[in-house]
Amino acid sequence: MKLSGAISFLTLATASAFAPSSSGGRRSGVDATTALSMSGVPRNPNFAKLAGGYLFPEIGRRRNAYLAENPDMADRIISLGIGDTTQPIPDHILSGLVSSASKLGTKDGYSGYGAEQGMGDLRAKIAEKLYGGIIKDSEVFVSDGAKCDIMRVQQMFGPGVITAVQDPSYPVYVDTSVMMGQTGDINSSTSQYDNIVYMPCTAENDFFPDIDNIPRADVVYFCSPNNPTGAAATKEQLEKLVKVCKERGSILVFDAAYAPFIRSKGVPKSIFEIEGAREVAIECNSFSKYAGFTGVRLGWTVVPDELTFSDGSKVRDDFNRVMTTAFNGASNIVQGGGLACLDDEGLAEINTLIDYYLENARLLKVAMEEIGYSVYGGTDAPYVFVKLPEGKSSWDTFSEILEKAQVVTIPGAGFGPGGEGYLRLSAFAPRDTVIEACERLKKQMA
């Protein structure tokens, strides 16, 4: 066939592929009356199980609805809601970002795709500076944040596992379990999903579950310091957790995103400080709260070589496959900022930032205690967990405070049924607004 003829044939073939069929545009299984308004692809039934929207966008929606009705209150809104940092990135850490960006404009400094697992220098520095050499740099997977890595971990485990979560807990663990098809439907009477093991964490048990009397799960998600309760697990508690996971053949996914807030002596910042953890645990972490990188996006996950599946294959190898298949690596610019974070100057700047937010937490905790509430957290964590009066709904309290004091909080029920009756306050606001919020809350909640 001549070239011109071949081009004409291909053009006609391509056009016909997108042309309406002789049957009036119908496709198998799709009614002609609906073909223009919807596809013929069935919805993933797991998404239909999700109860409402994700917590934090829902908070934003309600805040925006309030402002739509009360536009004159826009300048009065103070957010103690989502844990988003507010202080500028410090100079030395910023210089790492700027320098890395500038290099991309030079012939010698330009870089394209990097290793999906992260820059070798950054992986080594994380292992050395943050873990003191108790992990290997080859076990560090640099990413765009701990939240994203939780979903990657879920993709690796797939739908055939049973998950356990703290109750209350960061909603990502539950929602990703539902999305992956690990759960049944939500039970309307308990507000819990079937096939998830909920580990009650209450003031009565110091927000640490009675792990011995909780059913076995394949994968156990545990966050310390905890979001939302602010509780930081002791060494003895984590030793117990690791021991039980090892005895049961469970894998522990340890979320250490708030580790730099730990100031109490003897409280572990990493699960790998616990003997035996390398055989049972994965750890997810992030620079978001370390260095104000919530919008910059940089995190990491540690998967030890010793951790295996039941068939003896290495968990690390499968997680590496997820990263190399579905991720092109963290931004080269951002990783330069991560290297600067771990310089001595950067670590000093991080400590200053953490001290700033911890002082905010102290102010919030003191204010709530002066009103007369029982208050938890706020010591080794940036969150203050406030116990509401008996029978008081956390969503009703959220709405009441927003409407009367123009302060955005987070209702405890948003973190699971175990959070009902509590309110979470975030210490990440600027100092002057925290002080103002304390005064308003004293008037409103007294």
Image (cartoon, helix red, strand yellow):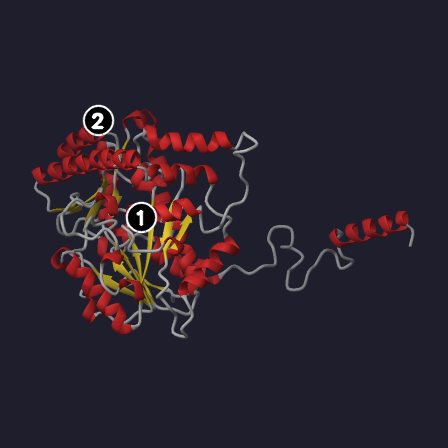
User: Where residue 22 sits in the image (x, y, percent)?
Assistant: 78, 58
Q: Residues within 10 Å of mark 1 (few under 14, many from 20)?
A: some
Who is closer to the viewer here, 109 or 170?
Answer: 109
Decide if residue 26 is on the left or right side of residue 385.
right
Q: For mark 2, what is the residue?
A: 432
Badge 2 or badge 1: first in the primary sequence: 1
What is the total number of numbered labels drawn onto the structure image?
Answer: 2
Q: Please tell me whether mark 2 sits on a helix, a strand or a loop.
A: helix
Residue type, numbered disc 2: Asp
Q: Residue at x 16, y 56 (%)?
A: 234
User: Where residue 120 sits in the image (x, y, percent)?
Assistant: 43, 47
The C terminus appears in which quarter of the rendering? top left
Q: Nearer the viewer, mark 2 or mark 1?
A: 1
Decide if residue 37 is on the left or right side of residue 167.
right
Whether label 2 touches label 1, CB < 8 Å: no
Find residue 128 and name its label: 1
User: Where residue 433 sits in the image (x, y, percent)?
Assistant: 23, 28
User: Where residue 90 sits in the image (x, y, percent)?
Assistant: 31, 30
Position of 247 relative to 431 (above/below): below
